[in-house]
Amino acid sequence: MEKPFEGLQRHAYWFLLLIPLVAAGFYKTYFLVLLEPTDSLIHLHFILMALFVAMLIVQPFLIRYQKFRLHRMIGRISYILVPLLLGSIFLMIRFSYFRFIDDLNNKIQQGTIQLTPKQVLKEAAIFEAIGFVYMGLLAIFYGLAIYNRRNAHVHSRYMIAAALTMLGPTVDRIIFFNTGLEKIAGFIRIETIAFLIADIILAALLIRDYRNNQSTRALWVSLIFFVTIQVMYFVFRKSDGWAGFVTFVMNP
């Protein structure tokens, strides 16, 4: 039977792919305009995100080279880092929400679009739905990973699921800012690509653990959460209920 962290050790180098993904995803929206005046919240969010990505990359290598004490120390630091990151994600969603509303109101004043105030709020809620998806998934999987930190096998699988939440903010940006497309073939939203990549990776790991007589419960839970929230995203993001929820959260 495979050791609890053996699969994670063997695939540690795959985590390095996060570096070019982040670089490509944020090149036009962050790195290219880095020296231009911008809100300090954007810099804070990027720094926290970069630290989290660095942690995701470093931790498997520390396991691979048996630096368990340092691995645990960085894990404890994450108790502060991840809540701060989640807070910055929420503030970035809020920042983007009100900027999107301002943009719509400017277009209304210019006469290029016609929307009621209620429709403006609904469009803003739809626009920010994907941010809530990944913020929620990150909170869920990181929480499950920490709750199961004494079970190496389960902990590592939930951390992999947490790492997969980084695909959306990077892959979506790479596609949109390099092609300008919001939909592929006119009907497939670009978010679907990152969704499918995450689902395929989790399914492949699940099959692998099953073949190695390892527990598959954590991967089943992760895959079910991913697929369920993905379906909810497509089904409910345009609903009045979602618009009401986001309006309440953004305007307490």
Image (tube, rainbow, N blue to C red):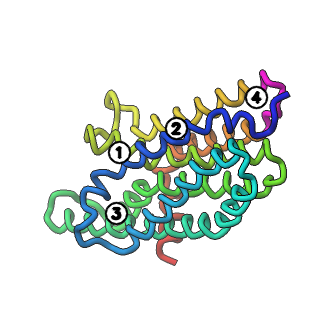
Find numbered disc 4 in the image and state the secondary structure of the residue it sits on. Answer: helix
Q: Residues within 10 Å of mark 4 (few under 14, many from 20)?
A: some
- Is tag 4's residue or tag 2's residue first in the polypeptide sequence? 2
User: Magenta part of the protein: which range?
Assistant: 210-217
Residue at the image point whose x is 24% and y is 72% from the top: 37
Q: Which residue is mark 2?
A: 195
Q: Nearer the viewer, residue 221 or 32?
A: 32
Q: Nearer the viewer, residue 30 or 111?
A: 30
Q: Which residue is mark 3?
A: 120
Q: Residues within 10 Å of mark 2 (few under 14, many from 20)?
A: some
Q: Which residue is mark 4?
A: 209
> How would you classify the magenta stretch by its main secondary structure?
loop
- The residue type indicated by label 2 comes to Phe
Q: Residues within 10 Å of mark 1 (few under 14, many from 20)?
A: some
- The residue type indicated by label 1 comes to Ala
- The residue type indicated by label 4 comes to Asp
- Is tag 3's residue or tag 1's residue first in the polypeptide sequence? 1
Find numbered disc 2 in the image and state the secondary structure of the residue it sits on. Answer: helix
Q: Nearer the viewer, mark 3 or mark 1?
A: 1
Q: Which residue is mark 1?
A: 24
Q: As displayed, is residue 234 above or below residue 102?
A: above
Residue at the image point whose x is 25% and y is 61% from the top: 33
Residue 6 drawn at (x, y percent): 74, 35
- Is tag 4's residue or tag 3's residue first in the polypeptide sequence? 3
Q: How far apart are the two marked residues, 3 and 2, measured between alpha carbons?
A: 27 Å
Q: As displayed, is residue 129 above or below residue 103?
A: above
